[in-house]
Amino acid sequence: MKILGDKPIFSHMPYIHDAGGSVSMLLCLSDRVVEKTSRRPAYRPWKIHAYDFANKTSTRIETGSEPNDVECSPVCYYRDGLFHLSFVLGKWVPCHEYDEYRDLRLYTMTGKSLTQLGEMQPVIPFMIKAGFEWYGKVVFATNNIVMHDNIDGKGRYDSDVGLERIIRLAPRHDHTTSVLVTGYRKGQDETVILVYDLDSRTVVGEVKTPDGQVTYKPSVFEKMMAYVVPDGDDEDYRVEFLKDIANPVSNIDVR
């Protein structure tokens, strides 16, 4: 958490990536809460930012979403001179007379830089729990199934990874077939981070910190790791970062 003026800024959903020759990080920031109503809980309207390690500054990535929409699970890659950004966008939608539900959909944007992206485009025409677009492949999850498909809809695979609920999918930028799956096993309150291989369609490992602690919604790139820790009430999160997985944790200073 960083205090900017009199507002605390919270951070969430890190993704470390190669930004066309230099290592950078995407993360979601929020400095406010949308108050609860009789039809839905309070929540933070997270927005995607690009974090500069050298200057310790963050730049908003303009997606065109509404102020109270939730942007989460950012993933990007650089190919053929273009940046490809995907993210999950959440909107609270009326369900019946008394309740609302959070409609989560996968979108992509493409441009010459992360500050020069075209309009966001929907990827799949239905709700998901988590997902991303990755070098022409779409990877997404329902409650407990990891699915991946070519962008043209051919070559669909469904994999049960042994979790009761999946809450995030994030590829490793340095291992393009490895996906970190954050979720919960049946009957357990603690999250587990599985490593899922897209080629073999199997779980090949788990991710923990060097001291053996389970992380929350992590991103790993070479020796670096970023993950989320609670910092107060519900949805009050902050990102912690390890420059070297063998070294102690350092906080992300957001400006």
Image (cartoon, rainbow, N blue to C red):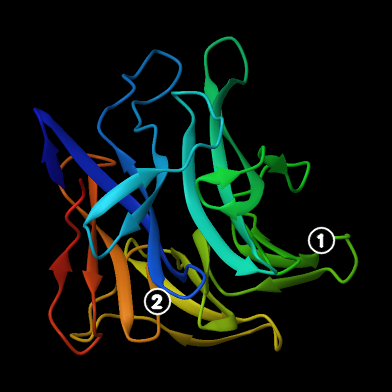
- Residue 66: image location, x then y, percent: 51, 24
Which residue is disc 1 drawn over? Answer: 151
Q: Amino acid at mark 2?
A: Val
Q: Amino acid at mark 1?
A: Ile
- Dot label at residue 226: none
Q: Quadrant of residue 102?
A: top right
Instruction: State if disc 2 and disc 1 touch (CB < 8 Å).
Output: no
193 relative to 88 in the view: left or right: left
What's the residue at 64%, 55% (across, down)? 142
Camera-side residue: 193 or 115?
115
Callout count = 2
For the point 30% across and 65% down, which residue is it?
227
Asked whether, in this view, residue 49 is left or right of residue 87, the answer is left
Sequence-wise, which precedes: disc 1 or disc 2? Answer: 1
Rendered image: mark on residue 220:
2
Quadrant that contains the C terminus? top left
| Residue at the image position 23 percent from the left and 43 percent from the top | 10
Please provide percent x and percent y for residue 132. 62, 59
Q: Name the residue furthest top.
A: 97
Mark 2 is surrounded, within 10 Å at the Cα level, by few (under 14), some (14 to 19) or many (20 or more) other residues, namely many
Q: Report the front residue among 154 and 145.
A: 154
Q: Is residue 202 in view from this perspective?
A: yes
Query: Can you say whether 75 is above or below 32 in the image?
Result: below
Q: Specify whether 65 is left or right of 27.
A: right
**Residue 166 can be seen in this image:** no
**Nearer to the camera, 89 or 140:** 89
Horizontal and vertical percent for residue 5? 10, 30
Residue at position x 56%, y 45% in the image: 116
Within 10 angstroms of label 1, few (less than 14), some, or many (20 or more) residues? some
In the rendered image, the vertical position of residue 168 relative to residue 72, given as above or below: below
Q: Taking 52 as reference, is 246 left or right?
A: left
Mark 2 element type: strand
